[in-house]
Image (cartoon, coloured by chain):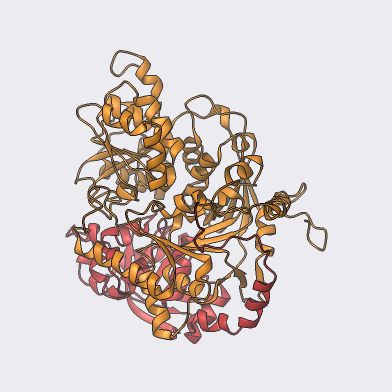
């Protein structure tokens, strides 16, 4: 599938070119066709209003799907939503979906869940597709080898009206992760290390393609964790070439092609990889075997370090902007330079989100918690990414493991990742969270967030301070 | 959308890098279903501090925000643009913008002007030494001026043209409706649709 000129192309270029409705002339951007548009209650109401005001139709309801995730409570979901403003927003989505004939999975529905969990789960996210949603973590879907990115509400309206977006081509960056991960080191640690390396602006203007043995070895769900946080490195999209792992994940899912369609699709998908000799605009290398569990200490996702490190000293940061940012972050986080990260005590552990709320994440954390107890000083929330994930976990008895350990077993939604529902940190509270953003106040006004993997989250819940599972094997508290 | 050609207003130096959209407007303000009235949410956590620059006269009447690098990172919420505009800002100047924020600004009629970090720092000094200094941002000439300070800024030509003309993106795209239809005819039949599938 090289281009007509025979030029070697990257995966991103192949997907881009196969969706060109029209190539822009001069300064005009390209017009790209969108295969799948995901909607949720927060960023869609003003877009539906715009359509109505202009008397426009939603062009392709059959390429559009909606779910309720950001606002929904994770307890008592059979009751009306207590917060009237949240309730209005959810009711507005229901009315809009009815009026414009969009399929909706509402609270309590068997397929309801976080928008980025349900797309792949239903088999709607497939290799080589263009996927958009009014949510920056749409980059998750790039794990299947498509171009998937978050858009603003004006663009949501644009896709509703035209099923296209005017876009300028992105530059391409290869993120090559060679080698093998050590036991206890996960996809989350890879991506946190990548962001710490290239910074929160490092991927700006690029599509990232994750490559290399460590990426190929990852499960489909782990690949989604990696692509999910591309936006935290400044890149709108991240992608991974599809392979047998991808095909095996998709086969038999409700919306995956079947029969001869499946064969035709797989034949097409096998071409979706960067050609030998294709050039990226930038390349970054990381050795997986050198990685250890990674956590953040500051207030942006690039402020991370290995768990074995200490809180950094801003005095030693040469760049003035970074030094000021580090000082502000330490002040907000109430941390002192030189404190071992392992000694930081948390009040709350949050396991969930579109980053780490899938069944493998729950299994990993449950394995650590089995036969152990959450520390008395800690509240642990387990929020499955979707109702299907919740059901699967219950069938495996994971809910029992969590509740036996003293954790709370909740319904599906975005929950404490961004605290739009009642699941929030109180001012001054500190969390270890498997979500994606440690911004000031993200999990509740005045709350302090450390981003971690599910394994670190579970071990932290047991010890009460940031920990990895291997810390649980030593008996003395605080021993390394 | 109203055309944007030139704007003059009080400059506000915001000496912070990585101003993410959660800081510009926290999630609790995103529950509204309207497109206006978000000014109360703008920088709401920081505005609780009396010393914060938007609580200090004459900066509270500012219309040109001058911020550190990596402005608008994080969430795709267009509410960040709406909050800045509803408060009164017409221009944000930074040495680096997050991609989604930059795109949203262009759609919402807020000018995201990219200057060299060196120029941003010069401008900060001008605004801090004489609070209330007006900044003139000229989209035709692509320049920022304040007293003796003059610097160029970057913006892509297409967004600049759209802002100067005040054009609506959807209207522009619908001029190509025939090409969209042609493309749709050529899509492979195995591409998924969201129409519910009967589960046995």
Q: Which chain is orange?
A: A
- Residue A70 drawn above or below residue A406: below
- Along the viewing direction, whichever of A341 and A122 lies nearer the viewer: A122
- Along the viewing direction, whichever of A262 and A382 lies nearer the viewer: A262
Residue visible at 42% across and 34% down?
A305
Locate residue A175: give its quadrant: top right
> How far across and down, in percent of the image, does residue B171 sit?
52, 84
> How far across and down, in percent of the image, does residue B61 sit?
25, 75
Locate residue A22: give its quadrant: bottom right
> How far across and down, in percent of the image, does residue B33 sit?
30, 71
- Residue A433 drawn above or below residue B165: above
Q: Which chain is red?
A: B
Q: How many numbered callouts?
A: 0
- Along the viewing direction, whichever of A109 and A238 lies nearer the viewer: A109
- Residue A264 drawn above or below residue A307: below
Locate residue A29: give its quadrant: bottom right
- Residue A214 drawn above or below residue A71: above
Residue visible at 48% across and 56% down?
A138
Q: Can residue A357 be seen from the camera position used here?
A: no
Residue visible at 52% across and 47% down?
A227
């Amino acid at each position: 599938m090289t281009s007509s000129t025979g030029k070697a192309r990257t995966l991103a270029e192949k997907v881009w070119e196969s969706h060109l409705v029209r190539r822009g002339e001069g300064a005009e951007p390209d017009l790209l066709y969108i295969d799948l548009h995901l909607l949720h209650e927060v960023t869609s109401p003003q877009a539906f209003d715009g359509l109505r005001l202009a008397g426009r139709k939603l062009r392709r309801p059959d390429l559009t799907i909606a779910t309720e995730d950001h606002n929904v409570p994770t307890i008592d979901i059979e009751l009306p939503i207590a917060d009237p403003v949240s309730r209005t927003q959810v009711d507005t989505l229901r009315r809009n979906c009815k009026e414009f004939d969009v399929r909706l999975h509402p609270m309590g529905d068997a397929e309801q869940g976080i928008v980025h969990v349900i797309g792949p789960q239903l088999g709607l996210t497939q290799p080589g597709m263009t996927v958009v949603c009014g949510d920056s973590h749409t980059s998750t879907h790039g794990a299947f080898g498509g171009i998937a990115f978050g858009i603003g509400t004006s663009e949501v309206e644009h896709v509703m009206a035209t099923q296209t977006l005017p876009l300028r081509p992105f530059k391409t960056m290869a993120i090559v992760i060679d080698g093998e991960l050590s036991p206890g080191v996960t996809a989350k640690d890879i991506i946190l290390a990548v962001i710490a390396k290239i910074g929160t602006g490092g991927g700006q203007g690029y599509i990232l393609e994750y490559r290399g043995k460590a990426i190929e070895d990852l499960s489909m769900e782990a690949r989604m964790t990696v692509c999910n946080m591309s936006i935290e490195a400044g890149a709108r999209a991240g992608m991974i070439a599809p392979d047998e792992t991808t095909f095996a994940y998709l086969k038999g899912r409700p919306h995956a092609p079947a029969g001869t369609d499946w064969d035709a699709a797989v034949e097409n998908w096998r071409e979706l990889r960067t050609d030998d000799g294709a050039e990226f605009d930038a390349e970054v290398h990381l050795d997986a075997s050198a990685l250890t569990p990674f956590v953040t200490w500051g207030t942006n996702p690039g402020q991370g370090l290995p768990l074995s490190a200490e809180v950094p000293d801003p005095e030693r940061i040469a760049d003035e902007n970074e030094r000021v940012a580090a000082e502000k972050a330490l002040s907000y986080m109430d941390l002192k330079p030189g404190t071992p990260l392992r000694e930081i005590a948390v009040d709350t552990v949050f396991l969930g989100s579109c980053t780490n709320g899938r069944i493998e994440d729950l299994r990993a954390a449950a394995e650590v918690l089995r036969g152990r107890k959450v520390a008395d000083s800690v509240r642990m929330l387990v929020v499955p990414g979707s109702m299907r994930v919740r059901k699967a976990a219950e069938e495996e008895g994971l809910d029992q493991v969590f509740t036996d350990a003293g954790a709370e077993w909740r319904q599906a939604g975005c929950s404490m990742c961004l605290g739009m529902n009642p699941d929030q940190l109180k001012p001054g509270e500190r969390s270890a969270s498997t979500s994606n953003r440690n911004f000031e106040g993200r999990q509740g006004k005045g709350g302090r967030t450390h981003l971690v993997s599910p394994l670190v989250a579970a071990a932290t819940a047991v010890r009460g301070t940031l920990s990895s599972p291997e810390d649980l094997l030593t008996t003395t508290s605080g021993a390394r | 959308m109203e055309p944007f050609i030139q704007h003059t207003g009080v400059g506000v130096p915001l000496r912070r890098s990585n101003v993410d959209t959660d800081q510009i407007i926290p999630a609790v303000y995103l529950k509204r279903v309207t497109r206006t009235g978000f000014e109360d949410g703008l920088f709401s956590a920081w505005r609780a501090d009396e010393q914060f620059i938007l609580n200090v006269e004459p900066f509270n009447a500012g219309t040109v925000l001058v911020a550190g690098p990596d402005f608008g990172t994080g969430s795709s919420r267009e509410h960040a643009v709406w909050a800045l505009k509803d408060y009164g800002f017409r221009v944000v100047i930074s040495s680096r913008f997050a991609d989604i924020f930059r795109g949203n600004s262009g759609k919402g009629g807020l000018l995201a002007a990219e200057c060299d970090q060196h120029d941003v720092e010069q401008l900060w000094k001008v605004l801090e030494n004489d609070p209330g200094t007006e900044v003139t941002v000229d989209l035709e000439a692509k320049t920022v001026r304040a007293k003796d300070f003059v610097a160029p800024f970057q913006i892509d030509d297409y967004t600049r043209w759209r802002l100067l003309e005040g054009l609506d993106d959807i209207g522009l795209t619908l001029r190509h409706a025939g090409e969209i239809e042609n493309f749709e005819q050529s899509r492979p039949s195995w591409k998924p649709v969201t129409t519910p599938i009967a589960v046995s």
